[in-house]
Amino acid sequence: MELFLIGMPGSGKSTAAKEIASLMQISFYDTDELIKKKYKMSIPGIFKEFGEKEFRKYEETVLNELIIKDSFIAATGGGLPCFNDNMNKMNDTGITIYLKTSIEILFQRLRKSINRPLLQGKSDSELFDYLQKTIKSREPYYSQANYIIDADKTLNEIIKSEPFNL
């Protein structure tokens, strides 16, 4: 079984994926971590040196390498489903699960984040506006997921949801 967790930064994809991988005894991957390992640079470093367009190419490369593996759960970067036909690739390969999180919860989780290049240097009002705009632009991709889970819930509630039922 190949599972892809998608959603906004701060939705809890990595945290949930690690727990689910442990409970299901399958491999865990984080596409941002795979990018850092493959390209030997931090995500903020890639953005700073090469820009978002190049980063999206790196995401696509890592996804193409990931989808040939078996029995895993992957936490994807927030924008990964929205570029280079990546959402269709994930849906064709396995099961996609959108961790849908309210803007209020995302705002609280992300307002103190320092390692997210698209959020750096934003005031609270700029962050809130960015989240509104980004959710609106990404929702058409995220809504193509096989499952949509309310990620305002606790981790325990999420892992008991379909399709996990753990």
Image (spheres, rainbow, N blue to C red):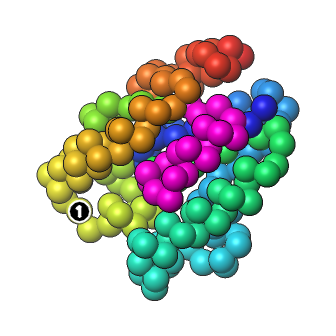
Residues shaded magenta = 79-97
Q: Quadrant of the C terminus?
A: top right
Badge 1 is on which residue?
122
Q: How many marks?
A: 1
Q: Is residue 37 above or below residue 108?
A: below
| Relative to 156, 79 lies left or right | left
Residue 155 visible here: yes
Residue 22 visible here: no
Q: Is residue 38 above or below residue 33?
A: below
**Residue 87 included in the magenta stretch of the image:** yes
Q: Identify the residue at the far bottom of this view.
A: 49
Image coords of residue 75 (percent x, y): 61, 45
Identify the residue at image location x=41%, y=71%: 52
Identify the residue at image location x=52%, y=40%: 6
Image coords of residue 54 (percent x, y): 48, 76
Q: Quadrant of residue 65?
A: bottom right
Image coords of residue 4 (percent x, y): 63, 39
Image coords of residue 59 (percent x, y): 57, 63
Identify the residue at image location x=70%, y=72%: 38
| Relative to 82, 41 lies left or right | right
Identify the residue at image location x=80%, y=27%: 24
Q: Identify the residue at the far left of this view.
A: 125
Q: Quadrant of the N terminus?
A: top right
Describe the element under mark 1 as helix, strand or loop. loop
**Residue 118 included in the magenta stretch of the image:** no
- Looking at the picture, which amino acid does disc 1 mark? Lys
Badge 1 crowding class, 10 Å Cα cut-off, few under 14, some 14 to 19, many 20 or more, is few
| Relative to 22, 7 lies left or right | left
